[in-house]
Image (cartoon, rainbow, N blue to C red):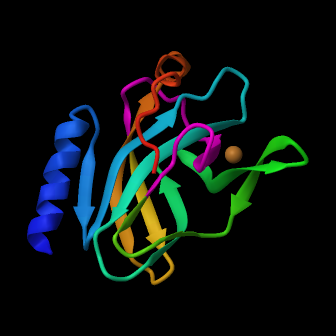
Amino acid sequence: MLRIFNRALLAAMALCACAFSYAQDGLMLSDAKVRQFLPAANSSVGYFALENHSERERILKAVELESIGRVEIHTHEHSDGMMKMRKLDSLTIGANSRVVLQPGGLHLMLFSPQQALSVDQTLKMTLIFADGERVNGQARVFSLIEQKRDSGSEHHHN
Ligand SMILES: [Cu+2]
């Protein structure tokens, strides 16, 4: 198990040389990023990938981000032919599986920034699970221009 986990970690690090990866108690947080708030916007978005290399499911209840007043977990779903966002009270990550928050799908919604965010700045991120467990990481701030450039080349479809 440990060997498999280490291999996955190495593979993830090799694939995402640009991203921060954090492993803790079988949970691996990677590619955490937060989009800069647009001028006059009162919300922005954030993404990350979370792998659960353990035999028990984990239930993510909340996410905290340094300098951000409020963070919600959202999903996109079709409703009456339209894509709508819906706030989730929790997000379950099954045993030995992964979730990816990315444009057009699951995402974080950020409200009430307490300071201006500059590109490539890192913010402390804490994932809080139903059992009280906390996983810490760092999220990188990216620009809207970067999101537009990346949106044509999504590479994770699980
Ligand atoms: Cu949303």
60 displayed left or right of 14: right
Q: Is residue 105 highlighted in magenta?
A: yes
The quadrant of the picture occupied by the N terminus is bottom left
* Residue at (41% x, 35% y) in the render: 155
Taking 78 as reference, is 35 above or below it? above
Q: Total marks drawn?
A: 0
Instruction: Say which residue appears at 29% left-offset and 38% top-offset.
Output: 19
Tell me where the magenta segment starts and ends, as one range: 99-122
Q: Is residue 7 rendered to the left or right of residue 54?
A: left
Q: Position of residue 79 (x, y in %)?
A: 85, 50
Residues 3 and 34: in front is 3
- Residue that extends furthest to the right in the rendered view of this protein: 80
Instruction: Give the farthest residue toward the left.
Output: 3
Residues 16 and 96: in front is 96
Query: Residue 91's x, y, as percent?
Result: 56, 67
Q: Going 25% across and 55% down the picture, which residue do you hit?
A: 22
Is residue 114 depicted above or below 79 in this figure?
Answer: above
Residue shown at 37%/82% (left/top)?
A: 56
- The verdict on residue 1 being magenta is no
Q: Position of residue 59 (x, y in %)?
A: 50, 75
Residue 94 drawn at (x, y percent): 44, 73
In-image side of 81 versus 90 (left or right): right
Q: Nearer the viewer, residue 129 or 105?
A: 105
